[in-house]
Amino acid sequence: MRKWLAMICCALVFCLTVVRPVSVSAMMPKSEAEAMAEELKRLDAEGKGAGTYRVTLQYLDGDKVTEKTIAMTIRGKNTVVDGVLAIDAKDISVTGEQVVSATAEDWIAWSEAKAWRIDDLAAVALVDLDAGAIKPVIGTYVLVVSAEGGVQTRAAVHVTSNAVLDDDYNKNKQAGYWYTDTFDANPLDFSAFNVWFGITIKAFLGILLVVPLILLLVHYVATTKIAKQVAFLLKSRQGDSLD
């Protein structure tokens, strides 16, 4: 009995000292680069966006397990890194009505704009936001965001609908936030091309429909008149023959 217990104990010791380290080492990254790749996958799976994060790397360095903590920066499409400063803003889609009433705080919130240091992860203040090129008209425009230290990024703004121009818009336009030209006094001006072009097309199509009808009516009247004249002549000749 004691012999069997001794054998079982030896087997357990063997498993703990040999099998487990071998299995753990087989799963552990073989280099710092592999460990960083694994951490990037983990951060992505957790839904982490652009930013710098503290992560602990574990990997095999020869026969020894090495562990170190580093600051890992995830870059988005519009992330800009300048020295130890980083800034990011996401591309967004908005309606024309949103553009008309948007404030600087709105643009920052919609684009999730932020700036930070990649060495100590401290937040950096945003100091300027330029949305002057964005109009409440369907199209793609550029939003420029700047932070302390001069780091700057650009994000695309997709305007998905046109806004009805009102007094608020005109006030903003005069202040230089947006710019457009309208020529209401002259509906045939090139600026109103989409209006008068539509009217011209409709008028042309109307003419194409009306003119054939008029020609058919004229042809019918003329044919009827000629037929009556022929019938009258035939009737007259028959009367003369009887006489």
Image (cartoon, grey):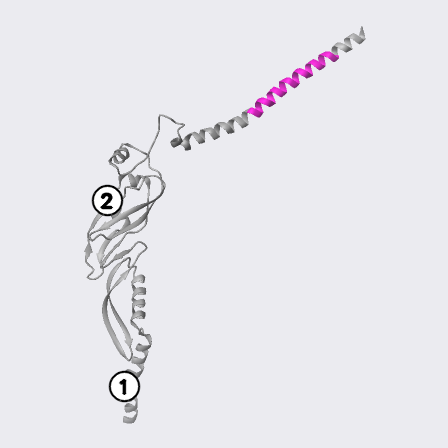
Real-space CA distance between mark 2 and mark 1, rounded to the nearest whole angstrom: 66 Å
Q: Is residue 47 left or right of residue 125?
A: right
The mark closer to the camera, 2 or 1, is 2
Name the element at disc 1.
Answer: helix
The quarter holding residue 133 reads top left
The quarter holding residue 160 reads top left
Q: Say what amino acid the circle numbered 2 marks.
A: Ala
Name the element at disc 2.
Answer: helix
What residue appears at the point 31 percent right and 82 percent down from the top-left corner?
A: 19
218 or 154: nearer the eye? Answer: 154
Q: Earlier in the sequence, mark 2 or mark 1?
A: 1
What residue appears at the point 71 percent right and 15 percent down from the top-left corner?
A: 230
> Quick check: 21 above or below 74?
below
95 or 180: nearer the eye? Answer: 180
Quadrant for the N terminus in the image: bottom left
The quarter holding residue 102 reads top left
What residue appears at the point 51 percent right and 27 percent down from the top-left corner?
A: 206
Q: Which residues are magenta?
A: 211-234
144 or 243: nearer the eye? Answer: 144
Which secondary structure dominates the residues rendered in magenta?
helix
What residue appears at the point 28 percent right and 84 percent down from the top-left corner?
A: 17
Mark drawn on residue 104: 2
Q: Horizontal and vertical percent for residue 22?
A: 31, 80
Q: Horizontal and vertical percent for residue 174?
A: 26, 34
> Quick check: 200 above or below 26?
above
228 or 182: nearer the eye? Answer: 182
Mark 2 crowd level (few <14, some 14–19, many ≥20, 10 Å Cα): few
Residue at which label 1 appears: 13
Q: Horizontal and vertical percent for residue 121?
A: 20, 60
